[in-house]
Image: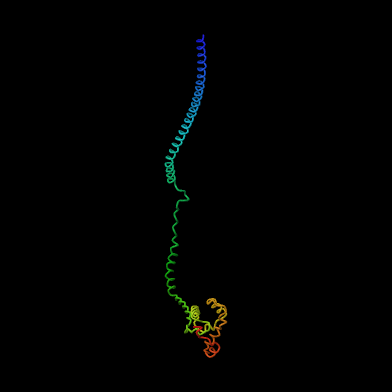
């Protein structure tokens, strides 16, 4: 009795284990079948895309062949068109028309003009030539006298004398003839401010220009001293 029970129990356990294993395997098998179905669908889609791309590639190849054929035929057609244009007769408006011959009456006038040319040449040769315009007289050069010793004046030392000579002032007479504008110009060069009037350069120069040495010595006793030199 116990043996039969154990055998029955083993049979039941075996059935349960087999059913469990079979269920697992069946589930795996179903999943594999699903994967296979999806792979087939992907393959079909890829095949359809391949066919479509192959058709587009064939169409591009045909278009390229047509363009190459047209390019090969284009130079021949243009050359034929140029030949036809060159062989076409020119319009009547563009054709040159012969110029009418000049009448014989124009010949005497030409002969008269040829005869008039020597006469005109003789008249031009006989006409007196105009005297050349006199040349302009050169402007007289300024006379340069002997330079005076400007350091005899109070306020003119070696430096100021050099600056004055650079401005063209070399004599007492020039300083004696200075105007207010001249004084202003010289003071700008010498960097003075009223010094010429204070030291009475013009009055000193007038006395020396007139040769009045006595008056110059009495009015300006310090002139030509070591201060100036």
Q: Quick one: 155 or 27, which is closer to the camera?
A: 27
Up-down: is 154 above or below 80? below
Residue at the limit of the structure toward the top, as seen here: 1
Q: Is 214 placed above or below 183 here? A: below
Q: Position of residue 9 (x, y in %)?
A: 52, 13
Residue 148 spot, x, y in % from top left: 48, 84
Q: Residue furthest bottom?
A: 214
Horizontal and vertical percent for residue 24? 51, 21
Colour scheme in use: rainbow
Question: Of residues 71 and 189, which is closer to you in this image?
Answer: 189
Q: Position of residue 67 (x, y in %)?
A: 45, 38
**Quadrant of residue 106 within the rendered picture:** bottom left
Q: Nearer the viewer, residue 175 or 88?
A: 175
Number of marks in picture: 0
């Amino acid at each position: 009795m116990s043996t039969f029970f154990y055998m029955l129990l083993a049979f039941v356990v075996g059935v349960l284990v087999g059913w469990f294993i079979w269920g697992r395997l069946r589930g795996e098998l179903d999943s594999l079948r699903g994967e296979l179905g999806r792979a087939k669908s992907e393959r079909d889609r890829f095949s359809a895309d391949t066919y479509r791309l192959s058709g587009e590639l064939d169409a591009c190849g045909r278009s390229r062949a047509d363009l190459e054929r047209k390019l090969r035929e284009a130079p021949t057609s243009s050359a034929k068109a140029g030949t036809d244009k060159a062989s076409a007769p020119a319009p009547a408006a563009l054709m040159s028309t012969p110029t009418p011959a000049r009448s014989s009456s124009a010949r005497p006038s030409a002969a008269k003009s040829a005869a008039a040319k020597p006469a005109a040449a003789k008249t031009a040769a006989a006409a007196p030539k105009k005297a050349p315009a006199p040349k302009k007289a050169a402007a007289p050069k300024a006379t340069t006298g002997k330079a005076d010793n400007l350091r005899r004046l109070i306020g003119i030392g070696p430096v100021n004398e050099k600056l004055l000579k650079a401005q063209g002032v070399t004599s007492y007479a020039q300083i004696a003839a200075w105007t207010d504008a001249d004084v202003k110009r010289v003071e700008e060069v010498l960097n003075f401010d009223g010094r010429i009037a204070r030291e009475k350069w013009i009055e000193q120069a007038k006395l020396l220009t007139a040769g009045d040495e006595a008056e110059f010595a009495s009015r300006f006793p310090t002139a030509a001293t070591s201060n100036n030199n």
